[in-house]
Amino acid sequence: MDFSNCWLDYRPMEIKEQALSALSVLCEGEIIESAVKEYQLALSRMTGREPEVFREKTNRCVALYLEPLLPIGKDGYEIKKEKDSYHITGQSESGVLYGVFHFLRLIRTGHMDELPVSNAPEMPLRMMNHWDNMDGTIERGYSGNSFFYENYEILYNERIEQYVRLMASIGINAIVINNVNVHQRETYLITDTYLEQVKQYAALFARYGIQLFTSVNFAAPMELSGFDNCDPLNDKVAQWWKDAVKHIYEVIPEFGGFLVKADSEGRPGPFTYDRTHADGANMLAKALAPYGGIVVWRCFVYNCGQDWRDKKTDRARAAYDNFIALDGQFEDNVILQIKNGPMDFQVREPVSPLFGGLKKTNMILEVEIAQEYTGQQIDLCYLLPMWREILDFDTFSEGEGSTVRQIVKGAQYGQNCCGMAAVINTGNDYNWTGNDLAAANTYGYGRMAMNPSLTSEAIAKEWIELTFGAAVADDLTKILMDSWPTYEKYTSPLGIGWMVTPHYHYGPDVDGYEYDRWGTYHRADRNGLGIDRTPAGTGYTAQYNEPWSAIYADRNLCPEELLLFFHYVRYDEVLKSGKTLIQHIYDTHFEGVEEVEEMIERFDGLQNKLPGDVYDRVRERMERQLENAIEWRDRINTYFYRKSGVPDEKGRKIYE
Amino acid sequence: MDFSNCWLDYRPMEIKEQALSALSVLCEGEIIESAVKEYQLALSRMTGREPEVFREKTNRCVALYLEPLLPIGKDGYEIKKEKDSYHITGQSESGVLYGVFHFLRLIRTGHMDELPVSNAPEMPLRMMNHWDNMDGTIERGYSGNSFFYENYEILYNERIEQYVRLMASIGINAIVINNVNVHQRETYLITDTYLEQVKQYAALFARYGIQLFTSVNFAAPMELSGFDNCDPLNDKVAQWWKDAVKHIYEVIPEFGGFLVKADSEGRPGPFTYDRTHADGANMLAKALAPYGGIVVWRCFVYNCGQDWRDKKTDRARAAYDNFIALDGQFEDNVILQIKNGPMDFQVREPVSPLFGGLKKTNMILEVEIAQEYTGQQIDLCYLLPMWREILDFDTFSEGEGSTVRQIVKGAQYGQNCCGMAAVINTGNDYNWTGNDLAAANTYGYGRMAMNPSLTSEAIAKEWIELTFGAAVADDLTKILMDSWPTYEKYTSPLGIGWMVTPHYHYGPDVDGYEYDRWGTYHRADRNGLGIDRTPAGTGYTAQYNEPWSAIYADRNLCPEELLLFFHYVRYDEVLKSGKTLIQHIYDTHFEGVEEVEEMIERFDGLQNKLPGDVYDRVRERMERQLENAIEWRDRINTYFYRKSGVPDEKGRKIYE
């Protein structure tokens, strides 16, 4: 076996309680059977003895019930202890499965005293987006190659099964199996060339309560059937999609639907035909509706051919500008997938104003577990605290309390076709995620989508206890919790973003994107830096509801961590800390490196408490992180020293 | 035929003179037969009639003579008219061939009145280096793919023959058929895997007086025969090479020798075993000597893993530092191939100090016809004027008059294993060189190596008349002659170099290499820019003989076009022109764009005088050049405006 078990690593442990060695299965279904298998597998591994399975009531056991009328919410579950037995009751088959996984977590972490438990997944859709290509590469993948594809073949093996178990255990219920950039061969995924193999995946996923989605090529009728256009209002095009979808559901009745990246970064889309995104999405939605399928339509649409000389165009404005007027025009089975920020998964961005703007449109929040701009699974960056901030952000769309969480869970506007989606960080590396500790983000994403009330810290601790045991929980939790602020310190300051090596997005290159076409500028000159996005500048702040629109536009009210995102600030301006901007830049960059050094020291203390291979792998990444942090520190400090001419107050080494 | 004839395009013309229609061949040899074929082909094409060929004396003819004792120099020739006949006498078979090509040029351009002519090639070796890879790509190729290789096969077709004719017509006598970066498959070029096919090339080359060379992998004994080292002082390694060379000459008796890039940019070499370059080169030289073969050993050796923070290490010093102590240690059949400048083919560099340093070593001057840093055959940049400056540079190695020309022609130290080498700019594009006008560099290189007394202007005019006819000669000559100064104006200023997009080397990226590992920095800050290479800085100036070492080290004496190469200069310092440095930067960049616009206007005037396809191709490149020039202008000006804060005196648009 060339892969680890991650958080499903049921190492041997002493389990005294008799009830756990008998499972009474009082419901039926293929997902129930997965739950049974999970219980058997876990107990066998932990105790060395296979638990007995009864298909009837028995005493001193763990009993599984299915109760669709359980007043708890879709796919919810209850776990309670009554006399000598444990009762796990699911509102659905998936509910039972989730209950079993929860119960196993309690056993594994020694928290059986936390019963009774009553839980339901908060986000209706809890999606994973794979950016896997059929040639076996993964776009923005930092953990090896795809385990789905190799050389345009679809794989099916033990690892796929393990993957699906991992996903189900954290509550994932929808998986998109291919990259949103749909290349030539991937266009065939929805045709007979590959459908039978996709069906195999879909069937496996279904046994674990997960729906399979594919990313589709909007121009598929042209590429596959020689159409001369893919105009969504062309009846023949619409019919082509209807026929294609009909055939998909004939082969795969449990198919989930499509994810679409259209009119973005060179992908085809409705704009070509002067149609709107609503026209495009609705055409696909109508084809999918008869089968209960949905269309997830990405809002990552902007001008990626911007002229750096042009200071009026603002990429941050693009998603809102492109979609706000379409609010209410989308079919019920269309969901707009909105990246958390208006730019692109930077270490710090404001929340996308679309969440506070759209009111009659299904929305899904897209985050990126893959650490494209946040250290590429070399540098440690535990992202849960960032995602929490996003979910907790109050959009004021319907007055106070209209948080992103309320909106994407469907509560704000009474929707159920919404939730969260994430670009996953897995690959065929032994440890799945390149850096062993990066699996905390994979795990945490699912847990948070299930239950956003869990704190980032609690999730970190839970993941650590499951994966490595309680002995390292406190130290590793601290290491994880400190990692995002540390990463932010040694990379780009105060929300300005980028400053990364073009294309690779790892390592510093302050001017790397400064004169390029991507709309990602810092505008640093000898006096200061930052983008004026107030009404006097690009006007982006006006896309927010009050009070945000006023707060962001006001240099003195603007949250400081986003200062340079919204304002051009002089190097000699004083921040709330009493430091000048330039001194803040120097200080944070020196601190960032120091914190990485402290982290390594703390981690070294765990050497004897972690498996040797885990320690070695992580330690090697930490070395590279330290190197990277030093490079960031020195380049950023030198860059701004050369521009500002202001020496460090504390006289530390800044290269000239 | 999917390729043009370039300067051998013998369009129909009226030829009245009776003597030209009879060729009297009074000598023998396979190169003589090539000369005969060339004459027949040219006359047939121009007149529509095949000239009569006599193998005896006849009246009113063109007569070919071979006269080894002709007191004119190796491979020289005389052409004179006597009574009704023309006499072409070669000192060697090649001399006859060169004489015929010269004679045909005179016919073609209507300069028969320039007789008598007496000429001998000035540079002993006139080499072309192909950076073609066997997969069909060309490193730094801007004219399509290789016409030598496709998918690891060696091609042999009409185009190869045309290529060899083109080379011979400009006096090339040595060709290296593969990239100096010898990859895995190319390592087999000197083995039976490919030798029979290489032999086919060598035989064809030989018929045109050209020797075939290959670039070799210094680690070949390891890669081909499983050796665990390639230490040049290891007898077994030396024996491996002796055996390999023996076999090469068994198959290809006319084989020329090896070109070697060792210990450079990641290539293997003697440094690995604590041996010197002399050890490495001499080992190969001894293997080649019995057969008259030679080793061309590149001096492009530097630390390509420099830390940008390190201001002591200076890449410019590297070739001299690495090779000067080895002077006198190389075998007689070793030639050091030295790039014209100490860095890497920038638009402006000082001449490599090695030319003035080495005295007991064969040297060959390497220039780059391929426009890697000079516009990539999109932008026009006629390089002859640059090469002239290099050849005319007085090194003062043995007092005044010790020019690079004297040294590499062998006159300074009485050598005959020396000359010029050039990285060629050809590919399988229809016009061979991407930009039709870039062929002026290909042509000009050969002509200049044959006869450095020819002016750049005369060569340009000759090439234009041969290729397009006299009607466009004046305008195109002006366009060519202005192109290098124009290119220099809109790109990096005053000898500082780089500021290009990393890896691609086309288009501006001021900080693109500034924090990288390549040793190519500009050190611009808010006060000024440039590298201090005086004794107070890196000490590079001390590698020159006096008076250069003093001149370069003196801010006020240093030639201004190299000012930033040798000195850090403040933006407000006044240049000889009376302008400040910053104003000079702004002015040259505005001027550069204006000059491109003027060039296009001038070129447009030729629309009806040039073949339509030529005009269209060149015009399209000029559009791209203008775009490129504007991008350079704006990025450079903005970059330095942001840093300096100094506005343009003339109030022109500089983006903020």
Image: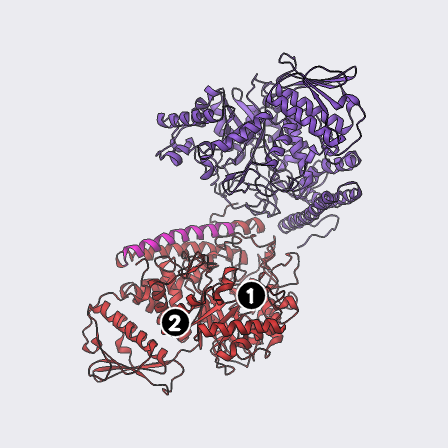
Chain colours: A red, B purple
Numbered label attached to residue A203: 2
Which element carries disc 1, helix, strand or loop? helix
Q: Position of residue B390 (x, y in %)?
A: 63, 29
Q: Amino acid at mark 2?
A: Ala
**Residue B357 inside the magenta-drawn segment:** no
Magenta highlight range: A610-637
Left or right of A24? Residue B400 is: right
The structure residue drawn at horizontal position 57% and vertical position 71%, both measured from the top left corner, is: A240
Left or right of B119? Residue A262 is: left
Mark 1 vs mark 2, CA separation in Å = 25 Å
The structure residue drawn at horizontal position 51% and vertical position 32%, both measured from the top left corner, is: B198
Q: Residues within 10 Å of mark 2 (few under 14, many from 20)?
A: some
Q: Nearer the viewer, residue B505 or A461?
A: B505
Quadrant (top left/top right/bottom left/bottom right) for the C terminus of chain B: bottom right
Q: Nearer the viewer, residue B480 or A495?
A: B480
**Mark 2 belongs to chain:** A
Q: Residues within 10 Å of mark 1 (few under 14, many from 20)?
A: many
Q: Amino acid at mark 1?
A: Ala
